[in-house]
Each structure stands twice: as C-alpha cells, then as structure tokens.
Image (cartoon, rainbow, N blue to C red):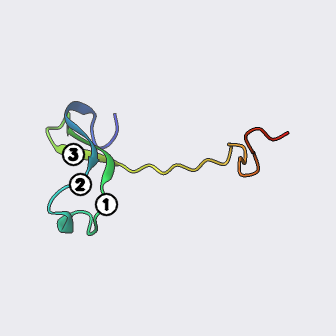
Amino acid sequence: MSPAGEIAGVHEVKIEYAPSPASEYLADVTSFDAFIDYERDTGERAFIAVETKLTDSFSPDTTSLRIGAG
C-alpha cells in the first residue's frame, strides 16, 4: 500500500478534459489528455491527470520517396 492509500473506486474517466473555470486549474486553454477521478480507501477523493506527448524518431524519412520512381 502506498502512503496515500489504495484506489477504492473510480468515479469518472474523461478524455480531453478541461476543468472549469480553466483559470482556477490550468491558466490557459489546454486540456488533460485523460483525467481519472477516484476515491482512496481512506475515503479521500483524488485525481490523476495524464498528458502525453508523441515523439517518433523510428519512422523512415519519406521526404525523398517518389511514387513510381525507379
């Protein structure tokens, strides 16, 4: 068990969630990619906010490929 307690239940999962009023939470016009509202086994409500970033350096460079070239 973590010091904060275990998750007893999930109340809500939201995708692309922006709490309102945004000025009290994010201070801009962004949103969380995922937002999980849950309750700890201690009875406290808490949340997990997820922000993801995609970086892809494994794809081939296709800028020089031409259809029908060859």
- Kindly report the distance in space between the C-alpha atoms of the residues bearing marks 1 and 3: 21 Å
The secondary element bearing badge 1 is classed as: loop
- Kindly report the distance in space between the C-alpha atoms of the residues bearing marks 2 and 3: 16 Å
**Residue 62 % position (x, y):** 71, 46
**Residue 6 % position (x, y):** 28, 34
Q: Quadrant of the C terminus?
A: top right
**Residue 39 % position (x, y):** 18, 37
Q: Earlier in the sequence, mark 2 or mark 1?
A: 2
| Residue at x 76%, y 50% (from the top left corner) | 64
User: Which residue is identified by label 2?
Assistant: 18
Q: Earlier in the sequence, mark 1 or mark 3?
A: 1
Q: Farthest residue toward the right?
A: 70
The secondary element bearing badge 3 is classed as: strand
User: Which residue is identified by label 3?
Assistant: 46
Residue 13's image quarter? top left
Amino acid bearing label 3: Ala
Residue 56 or residue 37, whichever sits in front: 56
* Callout 3 crowding tier (Cα within 10 Å): few <14, some 14–19, many ≥20: some
Amino acid bearing label 2: Ala
| Residue at x 34%, y 33% (from the top left corner) | 1
User: Which residue is identified by label 1?
Assistant: 30
